[in-house]
Image (cartoon, rainbow, N blue to C red):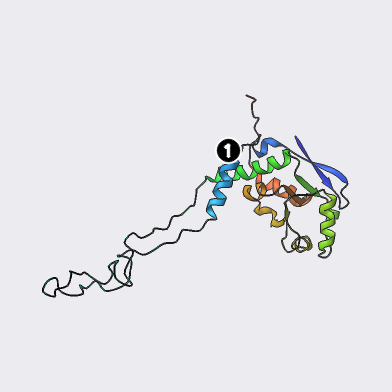
Amino acid sequence: MIEIPIYNTSGDQTGTYTIDPSLLGGEVRPALLKQAFVRFHANRRSVNATTKSRSMVNGSGKKLYKQKGTGNARRGDKKANILRGGGNAHAKVGHSWRQGMPTKMRRLANRNALLAKAVDGEIKLIDDAGKFEKPSTKQFASLLSALKIDRTCLVALADVTSAEAKSAKNLDNIDTTQIDRLNAFDLLNHRYLVAHKDAFEAYVTKVTQGVKAHTVEAA
């Protein structure tokens, strides 16, 4: 079992949250996490610039003038690549970088990224007393300082319009997200994860619902 510490706004530990690692994949799987990370990053890439070939250009297909008798070189329609407004001789075809991944693998990768954070001690849970009554960047910065957050941090909240989310907007290296939208890319792209204990517990219960616990055999 893995114990995740729960803190108050002063940075003092007030309890622990226990989670079964077998529900999150049993062990950290680097190959799976890399595949999920690369897939997410690749799917954010836009399609390369494309150009139109002769067949794609709008225009008449009528021959400009007759084949013989004019003294000019033979000529087809005005969509030829050597004419102004014509198509490209070697048109660029847009390339999609999208990658697929089975649903079960995606869900396992999300849980496994959470396991990696828990194993490394990079999850900071806050008790209910840590909820803000009104937005305050100074107060939120003090909270992060009390939790010893010194690197990039992902703040996962049940409501992205809450006072905590507004308080974190002006802080560098701090990103906020709705906790039910956590994914492997965001978890791996930040050093720490900060969340309220109740919201985190509800999220873990949701993503592990129906998952069969299994024991990983040592090699």
Farthest residue, direction left = 69
Q: Which residue is drawn at the image coordinates 53% and 53% (left, top)?
A: 43
**Is residue 131 among the parts visible in the rendering?**
no
Binning the other alpha carbons within 10 Å of mark 1 as few (below 14), some (14 to 19) or many (20 upward) gives few
Tell me the residue that label 1 is attached to: 31
Direction from residue 94 to residue 132 in the image, left or right: right
Q: Nearer the viewer, residue 180 or 117?
A: 117
**Residue 148 in sight from this viewpoint:** yes
At 65% from the left edge and 54% from the top edge, which residue is drawn?
A: 181
Residue beneath the point at 60% across and 45% down: 107
Residue 23, by quadrant, is top right
The C terminus sits in image quarter: top right
**Residue name at image x 18 percent, y 75 percent:** 65
Residue 137, by quadrant, is: bottom right
Nearer to the camera, 138 or 166: 138
Residue 160 horizontal/vertical position (percent): 71, 61
